[in-house]
Amino acid sequence: MRKGYGQFCPVAKAAEVIGDRWNLLVLREMLYGNRYFNDISRGVPLMSRALLVQRLKELEKLGIVVSHEKETGQGYEYVLTPAGEALRPIIEAMGVWAQQWGSEQIAPEDLDDALLMWGMRRRINLEAIPSQKIVLQFDFRGLTKGRKTHRSWWMIFEAGEVDMCQKDPGFEVDVLISADLSAFTHVWMGYTHLNLALKQGTICFEGDRDLVRQIPTWLYLNGEWRYGMGIDRSAAQLMQANKCVAMECNETVGA
């Protein structure tokens, strides 16, 4: 177990739980509903699996996480305790702070097409998607990690479920989305308007016109409440309220 701060201060005690590297991101994945090791690991791709095992054990000892053997198959299911769930507004507020006060520029080394696709997969607006089988192909260029500079992904919607493939599943593609990875990431995070990226040609949709018109709603590309990875509905509402207050303050000062 890591060394603490040696203080009884509540802030210090909280920092001992969530201050270790990766802990916040592990908790973020669990707050999104990921309960199995592989699912949590996909959300923190740069974290070694050995370290993830260690962090989950530490969080369990601290009473933040509890594990159970899977009902079927091998492995464990990890569930947040009431103490873990109580961290939700704290973690969401951190996302709000970063969105409002942190830098809106994503560095090239921060780009990750796998993390982007995984983030989109768990934040799909399923209620807006037609019932028929639909296949989207994403062709990303401008990758900065590894030797490849471009890579393709496939997202399949069928019967209210979303499947994602890195290898061609062999299905007919309904819409092809070609995009610069940086541009698409900025749009999905809410930093750049989709229309601007389309006008600049950094994002391009090809395929069924009716489906193309609907895709931004499915993937939350129009600046809706999602606002970006790690920020939930309540947090985004708080962010919007803060912006309104700031505007009112500016108007008062300028009066």
Image (tube, rainbow, N blue to C red):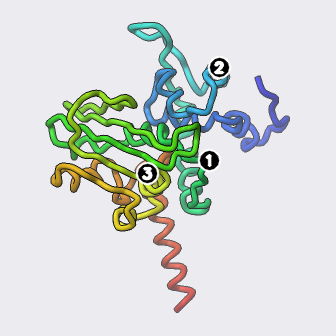
Res 53 quadrant in image: top right
Q: Is residue 64 above or below residue 145?
A: above
Residue position marked by numbered label 2 in the rendering = 50
Question: At which x and y percent is residue 23?
Answer: 63, 34
Element under disc 1: helix
Query: Which residue lies at the image location 69% right of the left edge and 36% below the top edge?
Result: 21
| First in sequence: mark 3 vs mark 2 | 2
Question: At which x and y percent is residue 162?
Answer: 30, 33
Residue position marked by numbered label 3 in the rendering = 234
For label 1, the crowd category at 10 Å Cα-Cα, with few meaning under 14, some 14 to 19 and many 20 or more, is few
- Judged left or right of residue 178, residue 207 is left
Residue position marked by numbered label 1 in the rendering = 109
Q: Is residue 189 above or below residue 78?
A: below
Tell me the CA gap for discs 2 and 1.
Answer: 23 Å
- Judged left or right of residue 26, residue 170 is left
Is 249 in front, or is 181? Answer: 181
Q: Is residue 149 above or below residue 107?
A: above
Quadrant in the picture for the N terminus: top right
Tell me the CA gap for discs 3 and 1.
Answer: 30 Å
